[in-house]
Image (cartoon, helix red, strand yellow):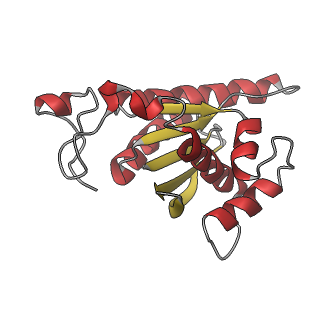
Amino acid sequence: MRVLGFDPGTATTGYGVVEQAGTRLRHIAHGVISTPPDMPFQDRLAMIFRQVGELIQTHRPDAVAIEKLFFSQNITTGISVAQARGVIALAVALEHVPLGEFSPLEVKNATVGYGRATNKQVPEMVKILLNLDQIPRPDDAADALGIAICQTYSGARAGIMLTPAYQPASRGSPASRGSPASKGSSRRKSGR
């Protein structure tokens, strides 16, 4: 199972791609989508939307995972994150890929084994779980990898990968995830 994880934000959205084969995890890619601070907010959101679509097309994930909205004090930041989450979710829906949402506590539990772990423990465990030489940078990308790892561990249990409309026909044929691909026309390409 290949998962594309996102740590949403308007200024910086982290992404990470992880593949699971049996009990083994493999790092595929990570990075950030950065938008200029002087760009109008609607253009920033459009930029995130386009780049998320490109990442889905490039990496062809079986599922996408995104961090649930969590904020305690700064409402402005929460609104900004919610806007980024919305355009990410829209891009995912238009590509007919299942979407999982995970709280920071769930991500910490999946990566560190303890939901109250510190924020510094997650990137260190991401490095260990993915057998990387160093902690992935920037932090937003490391968090996105953690979110993707969380999806790989819980995807089937949560029923996300079991929804009939999202089942791929096979690795080498066009995806039949309830999209126009199953009827013969889609932007999605066959194979990886």
Q: Is residue 126 above or below residue 190?
A: below
Looking at this view, name the residue that lies furthest to the left: 184
Which quarter of the figure has residue 161? Answer: top left
Measuring 62% from the left and 71% from the top, which residue is drawn there? 131
| Residue 176 seen in render | yes
Query: Could you tell me residue 189's position as x and y percent?
Result: 22, 47
Measuring 46% from the left and 36% from the top, which residue is drawn there? 49
Q: Is residue 32 above or below residue 40?
A: below
Q: How many marks?
A: 0
Query: Could you tell me residue 22's position as x and y percent?
Result: 47, 57
Query: Could you tell me residue 62's position as x and y percent?
Result: 39, 43
Measuring 49% from the left and 47% from the top, which residue is drawn there? 4
The answer to whether 42 appears left or right of 177 in the picture is: right
Query: Could you tell me residue 181's position as x and y percent?
Result: 19, 34
Looking at this view, name the residue that lies furthest to the bottom: 133
Q: Quadrant of the C terminus?
A: bottom left
The answer to whether 19 appears left or right of 115 in the picture is: left
Which quarter of the figure has residue 86? Answer: top right
Of residues 84 and 136, the one nearer the viewer is 136
Which quarter of the figure has residue 124? Answer: bottom right
| Residue 34 seen in render | no
